[in-house]
Amino acid sequence: MPAPELFDYFPADAAAWISETPLRAEYARLMRGFHRPIPWEQTHAPSLAPEVRAELGRIWGERIPTEYRSITGFSTLSFDFIAAGAPVDLVAVCHRVCIDELRHTELAVKMVDVYGGHRPPLPREISSLPADASLTAVAQASRSAILLSCLGETFACTELAMLRDRAVDPVVRGVLTIFLSDEIVHARVGWAYLAHALRTADDATLRSVAEVVPEYVAGIGRNLFGSDDAPAAVEVTNDDARLAAHGVCSMREEQELYRKFVPEVFLPGLRAVGVPVDVEAALAALPAMPVVAPAAT
Ligand SMILES: [Fe+2]
Ligand SMILES: [Fe+2]
């Protein structure tokens, strides 16, 4: 039997920035993961107006460095977990997240191809998590878990669920389904760590974890929506309703979702796992609405 080709394993049939060594076959198996293949040939991209295609290519291009960079965030979290004596299943799943983020990078590259965009150069940015040497290892790991996983990844789940549900294009639905099912695992890593570690944490640790929550809420808000002095870190929204069938929402919808997510999901979740968060201070840290003007009709 002939040796399987890369595309027999891989959800996207062309891998980005791949080596020419035998490890490419192992890589392809990792990228395939547990996921169903995507019906690439069913894309609606060829029937789109050129400006809509170009904008979708741009949006997927913006996702490439974000997905790739999050590998480094979860690598750091795995160091924090090991330093804090986290159980091995949490450490292992944290490493799985890094592989998943590579899969997302690959899928974003493929989507840029689908919409006819240009593949950007291999990203080299490293994301750094806030670190404080005066903290205990458990407090540091808990803070990192909250920022990256409980806030960042859990919000990503709510947004992906919304985007996937509105998507009509079968390729977009397939890709966003893979993203969503991976991101649910990424969110669970943080919640599971807090549920485990905070059961036995002392009051000083709990307080030092809780006190940073408002600034994390504000920080992610600034990244997503920009502030008076800086634009959003990643611009993947668009007010053009034609893009909704391809899994895009407006910035206003994203803001509204974040303003619901924090009080209805994030803060109750933190309290449930024992973080004595000041709910009022955290809500006051939410970005004001509307940061952007509503879409013209
Ligand atoms: Fe991702
Ligand atoms: Fe993720």
Image (cartoon, rainbow, N blue to C red):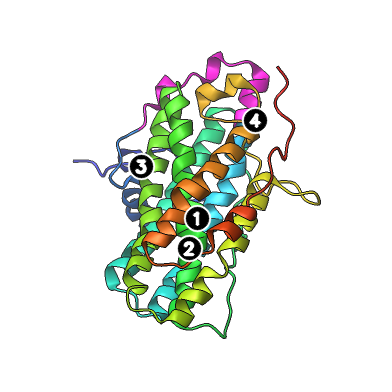
Residue 176 vertical position relative to residue 145 in the rendered view, above or below: above
Left or right, 79 with respect to 297, comes to: left
The residue type indicated by label 3 comes to: Phe
Q: Is residue 45 magenta?
A: yes
Cα distance between the residues tagged 4 and 1: 23 Å
Region rendered in magenta? 38-56
Q: Which label was assigned to residue 151?
A: 1
Picture quadrant where residue 8 is located: top left
Tags 2 and 3 touching, CB below 8 Å? no
Q: Of residues 288 and 116, which is closer to you in this image?
A: 288
The quadrant of the image that shows the C terminus is top right
Q: Which label was assigned to residue 10?
A: 3
Q: Residue at coordinates 61% horizontally, 24% vertically from top-left?
A: 53
Q: Of residues 68 and 167, which is closer to you in this image?
A: 167
Residue under label 4? 238
Residue under label 2? 146
Tags 1 and 3 touching, CB below 8 Å? no
Of circles 4 and 1, which is in front? 1
Beta carbon of the mark 1 residue lies under 8 A of ligand 2: no
Task: Say whether disc 4 or disc 3 marks the residue closer to the N-terminus.
Answer: 3
Disc 4, SS:
loop
Q: Residue at coordinates 35% horizontally, 73% vertically from top-left?
A: 197
Of circles 2 and 3, which is in front? 2
Cα distance between the residues tagged 4 and 3: 30 Å
Tags 1 and 2 touching, CB below 8 Å? yes
Of circles 2 and 4, which is in front? 2
Q: Which label was assigned to residue 77?
A: none
Cα distance between the residues tagged 1 and 3: 30 Å
Residue 274 vertical position relative to residue 218 in the rendered view, above or below: below
